Image: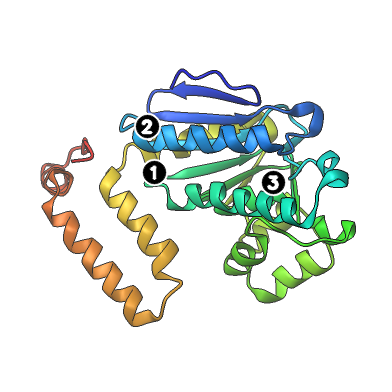
Amino acid sequence: MSKAYETLKVEREDSILWLILNRPHRLNAFNDVLMEELADALDTAEKDPSVRCVVITGEGDRAFSAGADVTMFPKATPVKAEEFSRLGQKVFSKIEEMSKPVIAAINGFALGGGLELALACDFRIAAEHAELGSPEINLGLIPGWGGTQRLVRIVGLAKAKEMVMLGTRLKAEEALKIGLVHKVVHYEKLRDEVRELAKKLSEGPPIALKYAKFALNFGSQVPLDAGLRIESGLMALTFSTEDLKEGVEAFMSRRKPEFKGK
C-alpha cells in the first residue's frame, strides 16, 4: 500500500499493516476525511493477499481516538447526524467483516467513537495509561457507531448500561478485568507486544483464520443450531485447502508449518 493520506498514516512491516489515525491535535478524533480514508485503507488491505494482519492505533501517546470531532456538532442536523452515524457503522463493520485479523493498539484515550472502533477489532491491547469509555450521554446523545450493540456483546448488558447510561470511563486495568481488553502493557512496550501478536496471527493459516473469525463473530449472533451449522460448514471447507494439508504434514513431521493461504 503506497497511498498518501491526509489524516491517516500507513506503515508496513512484512505482512503486518499499521493504520495510524493521524489527527493528534484533535486527539485523533474522526471527521469526514479520516473516516473516508480509513474506509479506503481497509478496502485496500482486504484486497491485498500479502497483508495477513492489520493493526489500528493512534498517533502520539495521548489518544487512540476521542471519537467524533465535536467541532462538527454545532452545524449538524438530525439528517446529517444519521448519515455520519451510518457511515461510521459501515466503516467499522468493514473491520468486523474483514477476512484478516485486526488488532486495536490502544495507546491512550479510547472514548466514544474511539471505543466503538476498538470494539470492532478482533483483539484489543491497551497501554496502562489508556482510558476507555462511552461519554456521549454527557453531551446529550448516545453512541452511534455500534457502541450500544458491540459493547453489550463483549462485556454484558449490565456493564454496558453502566458505561453507556452513566458515561463511565474505565482505566485500562479495569477494562482488562471485565474482558473489554485482552492485555494491558507499559506504553513503551505497546508496539512490541502488538507486533508479537500480529506476527503470530500473520503466520497462521489465512483461510482458517477467516472462517474462525466469521464463525465467532456471526455464528454467535444466531440460534445455537444455526451457529453450529455455520461452524460445520466452514470447518468442512478447510478440508479443501492446501493449508490443512501443510498443517497436518508439519504436525506429523514436527516442524513449523508454512501456510500460504491456499
Question: Reading the chain from its start, which is encountered first: label 3 or label 1?
Answer: 1
Residue at 61 percent across and 61 percent down: it is 179
Question: Reading the chain from its start, which is encountered first: label 2 or label 3?
Answer: 2
Eyeballing the image, is 225 above or below 69?
A: below
Q: Taking the image as drawn, is residue 107 in sight? A: no
Residue at 29 percent across and 69 percent down: it is 230
Disc 3 crowd rating (10 Å Cα; few below 14, some 14-19, many 20+) is many
Residue at 77 percent across and 57 percent down: it is 78
* Residue on which disc 3 sits: 114
The one of 141 and 24 positioned closer to us in this rendering = 141
Question: Reading the chain from its start, which is encountered first: label 1 or label 2?
Answer: 2
The one of 175 and 47 positioned closer to us in this rendering = 47
- Label tally: 3
Estimate the spatial distance between the alpha carbons at disc 2 and disc 3, rounded to whole Å: 24 Å
Q: Is residue 29 left or right of residue 71?
A: left
Q: Secondary structure at mark 1?
A: loop
Q: Position of residue 217 (x, y in %)?
A: 44, 62
Q: Secondary structure at mark 2?
A: loop
Q: Taking the image as drawn, is residue 34 in sight? A: yes
Q: Secondary structure at mark 3?
A: helix
Eyeballing the image, is 161 above or below 210?
A: below
* Residue on which disc 2 sits: 51
Q: Are marks 1 and 2 in contact (CB under 8 Å)?
A: yes
Amino acid of disc 2: Val
> Residue 100 got which mark?
1
In the picture, the quarter occupied by the C terminus is top left
Amino acid of disc 3: Gly
Estimate the spatial distance between the alpha carbons at disc 1 and disc 2, rounded to whole Å: 8 Å
Which quadrant of the figure has residue 212?
Answer: bottom left
Which quadrant of the figure has residue 149?
Answer: bottom right
Residue at 81 percent across and 27 percent down: it is 25
Q: Position of residue 257 (x, y in %)?
A: 21, 39
